[in-house]
Amino acid sequence: MSGTPMVHADRVSKSFGSNRVLKSISLTVNSGEVLCLVGPSGSGKSTFLRCINHLERVDAGRLSVEGQLVGYRQKAGKLYELRPKEAAFQRREIGMVFQRFNLFPHLTALENIIQAPMRVKGASKAKASKRAVELMERVGLGDKAGHYPAHLSGGQQQRVAIARALAMDPKLMLFDEPTSALDPELVGEVLDVMKELASTGMTMIVVTHEMGFAREVADSLVFMDGGVVVESGNPREVLANPQHERTKAFLSKVL
């Protein structure tokens, strides 16, 4: 599959009723790259992210992951939407971390992590638990495996959520503003885990307001507004010398 982009969006459009949220978005993310999506609220960033794993269906255009159409199959030149079970099968190779941690409150951190590998991939409890312990160590929570979400800070819960996504051994990780629900002093511990993940070559698409993270970790930065890609390029160049007035106005408020 070398040479095939990890994610390729070709003129992707999406509407909710009369509101066109995505207007012909085209972009490419290669394997091992980190792409940061930035822009004001309502610009379509999170919707685009949800389209990548078919949590939202696209209205026009095409989205593919490693050369495979997402959510659809093509037959005789026409696209047919996959059945929910088929879409779920595709989705298991794409990890997603949301703003809200979405942990099961009645399960411990370790139990939260082992659910998907056991239920979706048929892993034994022993194997899933061994991997979960390794992942808890990796995200710096080796001593919290038996803790329930209510007894963990927001930053700790988000790190459990990252470990839970990694437990499925995804080839692509999507992060939807993973630090926006956190107290400021907890943001760093989550970003540190994401930086470590990026350093191992994980392909990542990150919707974020953390410009320092984008500058330091991302291979490319895309600024979206009003459902279109306004500007994209090397993060340091875009942040230091934006070419479009809309980008300049946005960055003047967040930098």
Image: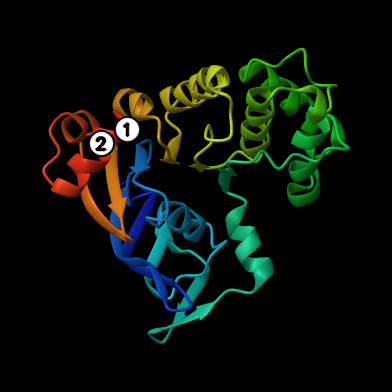
Instruction: Measure the alpha-carbon separation of dots 1 and 2.
Output: 5 Å
| Residue 130 spot, x, y in % from top left | 77, 24
Identify the image quadrant of residue 190. Answer: top right
State whether residue 197 is above or below residue 20. Answer: above
Is residue 232 shown to the viewer in this render? no
- At mark 2, the secondary structure is helix
State whether residue 76 is above or below residue 219. Answer: below
- Tell me the residue at 48%/61% (across/down): 51
Looking at the image, the residue that sits furthest to the top is: 143
Residue placed under numbered mark 1 in the picture? 254
Query: Total label count?
Result: 2
Looking at the image, the residue that sits furthest to the right is: 106
- Tell me the residue at 34%/57% (across/down): 8
Task: Out of 32 and 163, give the one closest to the viewer.
Answer: 163
| Residue 9 spot, x, y in % from top left | 34, 60
- Tell me the residue at 64%/59% (across/down): 89
Task: Out of 255 and 54, give the one closest to the viewer.
Answer: 255
| Residue 161 spot, x, y in % from top left | 66, 34
Task: Out of 245 and 108, give the one closest to the viewer.
Answer: 245
Quadrant occupied by the C terminus: top left
**Label 2 crowd bin: few (<14), some (14–19), many (20+), radius 10 Å:** some
- At mark 1, the secondary structure is helix
- 120 to the left or right of 108: left
**Label 1 crowd bin: few (<14), some (14–19), many (20+), radius 10 Å:** few
| Residue contact at pointers 1 and 2, CB within 8 angstroms | yes
Three-letter amino acid code of the residue under disc 2:
Leu
Residue placed under numbered mark 2 in the picture? 251
Task: Out of 239 and 205, give the one closest to the viewer.
Answer: 239
| Residue 76 spot, x, y in % from top left | 41, 87
